[in-house]
Amino acid sequence: MPSKFIRSFLSLGWLFRPSIKTVLIGSISALVTVAVGLVLAVSLSANVSNTFSLLNQTSLLLIDNVNTRLTSRLMQAQRTVEYLSELYERDTFGINQKNAALDHILRGAIGADTSTAVLMVFDTQFRHQGLYLGEANTVVPLAPDLAVPERAKVLLKTLAVADKPIQWGGFLQAGPATFVTVAARLERDGQLGGFVVAAIPVSILAEELKAVSETTEATMLLLRDNGAVIATSGVNELLQEPGETYFGLVDRRLYKDPVLRDFDRQGDVDGFEFAAKFGVNVRRIEREKDGFLIVISTDIRGFDTQPWTVAGYLNRGQAGEEVRRLMLSFVAGLAALLAAIVVAWVLGKRISRPIRTLAENAQQVSSLELEKVDMLPRSRVREFDDQAIAFNRMVDGLRAFSTYVPRRLVHQLVGQGRHEGVQFQQRDLTIMFTDIVGFTTLSENLSALETADILNQHFSDLCQAIEQHQGTVDKFMGDGLMAFWGAPDRVDNDAVQAIAAARQIIKSVKERNKRRVAAGLPALRMRIGLHSGAVTVGNIGAPGRVNYTIVGDAVNVCQRIQDAGRSLLDGQEIAVMISEDTLEKSGITASDVQCLGTQSLRGRSAPIRLYSLQENGLETE
């Protein structure tokens, strides 16, 4: 009983078939509603619970924000050196002094990279060519005699034998500026050709910290593991002038900022276990007058020989502000939900448009009305663009396919989706064979192109006449053609249609002969044989390549009838030979034909009565 109910329920799905637009709008709206609703529920729960639970989320967002910004800046430089390394490997540029191609490539790379301020290419002897960003972001070539710091040479020598082809090399100082560097080997065919180095000023990292600080009201810090301050969001006041620095980076203990000065004296704060699971530490630093400061920090690895620590701190009074912000975010979330539903409706409508167009064109393909099929336009969306390209190629292929096989067969295989037309069947058909008289001799004085042009024109006339009268063109045999009526689609009056096609062929050939004679070319003479009888129709051939054709004694008889016109009607411009079976089946009048008597055909013991169409029977009905 339950299974019967389920089957009945599922069968109702075929009664209700929503449009793709309805499905997309409904599913996207539901997904957005569920997603935003869950986020809002979690936010409300966190707001109701306690401040520390709320700060867990704030801590993660804060650290994730600054990590994303810093990593994005640094990885942009890494992608630049990776790209140049790939270009070198593909032999796009070489390494030599005053290389114009390399200068052009470096200018493009540094122009596209918003993080890198210095970009240099070294050969294995540390000769270099490079650029740097000057005032107003102008690109300035580096002097070729610029001295390379020994530390840079050591880093490049280390990179030459390192396991990885890319390496972050720590810090370098040029004048008052400090840079973080990343280098990549330049290799081609397994041979080391040199190095490419990108330098990112720490001021870029400070700008990212400042951007985060402006949006979160947190003071942001970036420290090296040895205590050197890499960048801050605005903490610059020192207790005293620094003496020796680490490549321009000042020790944190020389700053007046209490968090920097007492960074190693942080105390634990309960309630932040959730943040700790994601590698985010939430601690506090006691202050004599203002209570304590909440410090949120995590480590960043992979851009130096030592880990970096990114940290932000809030004072205790800012916790309530975070609660108010989350309440505002809840209200904003509701507005976003409504906006998302509107956007879902717009997106659903836009996304469904190419699918709907595809469905409409697919209907035309299914009925094999290929001439009515419009090519799908290209799309900026990859999947839709691939869909359009594939569909257009399919239509082009089907159009080409329909020229290589009988149209009626294609209509059955593609348009109607049936298989009867390719299965072996016994049918009573009317068959036609044609042949151009003396074409072998005629073609001896023609080029291959001229021969092909004559045959293409001739067969075009024949095929047009045959298809207009419901016939199927089977094959071309040199200058001859074989066709039949009654398969794959049945034709009630197949003999009548075959004779009508012969009449149209004769008229077309005579008209073309007039034009050939007027142009000083010889007229074509041809023979046509028609016979009706039982044949086997279907696919014949190997498993990987078949031909839809007919076989049987009636086929051989028809070909012999066409051959008989060579002797029986040798003087005629166009000889049409009809068997008695076809004549009786067609029911045409005696005035349309001339009886040629009973004739013996080559290769057959039994004679057969033949007829030819009279001149008054050669008009197209």
Image (tube, helix red, strand yellow):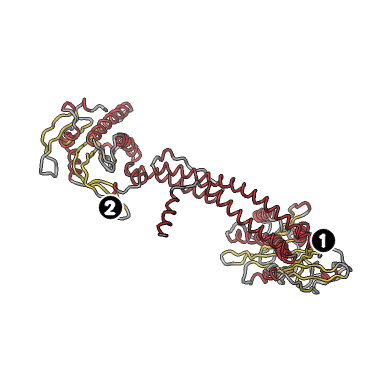
Residue 482 location in percent, x, y?
A: 25, 41
Which quarter of the rendered picture does the N terminus lie within?
A: bottom left
User: Label 2 crowding class (10 Å Cα cut-off): few <14, some 14-19, many 20+?
Assistant: few
* Residue holding disc 2: 541
Residue wearing tag 1: 234
First of labels 2, 1 by sequence position: 1
Q: Secondary structure at mark 2?
A: strand
Where residue 537 sits in the image (x, y, percent)? 24, 46
In this view, 450 is above or below 246: above
Amino acid residing under circle 1: Gly
Density class for disc 1 (Cα within 10 Å; few <14, some 14-19, many ≥20) is some
Residue, x 49% and y 49% (percent of image)?
A: 387
Residue 97, compared with residue 561, is above or below; it is below
Q: Is residue 244 visible?
A: no
Q: Residue furthest front?
A: 1
- The residues bearing labels 2 and 1 have C-alpha atoms spaced at a distance of 83 Å
Looking at the picture, tell me which residue is in the foreground, 345 or 476.
345
29 or 536: nearer the viewer: 29
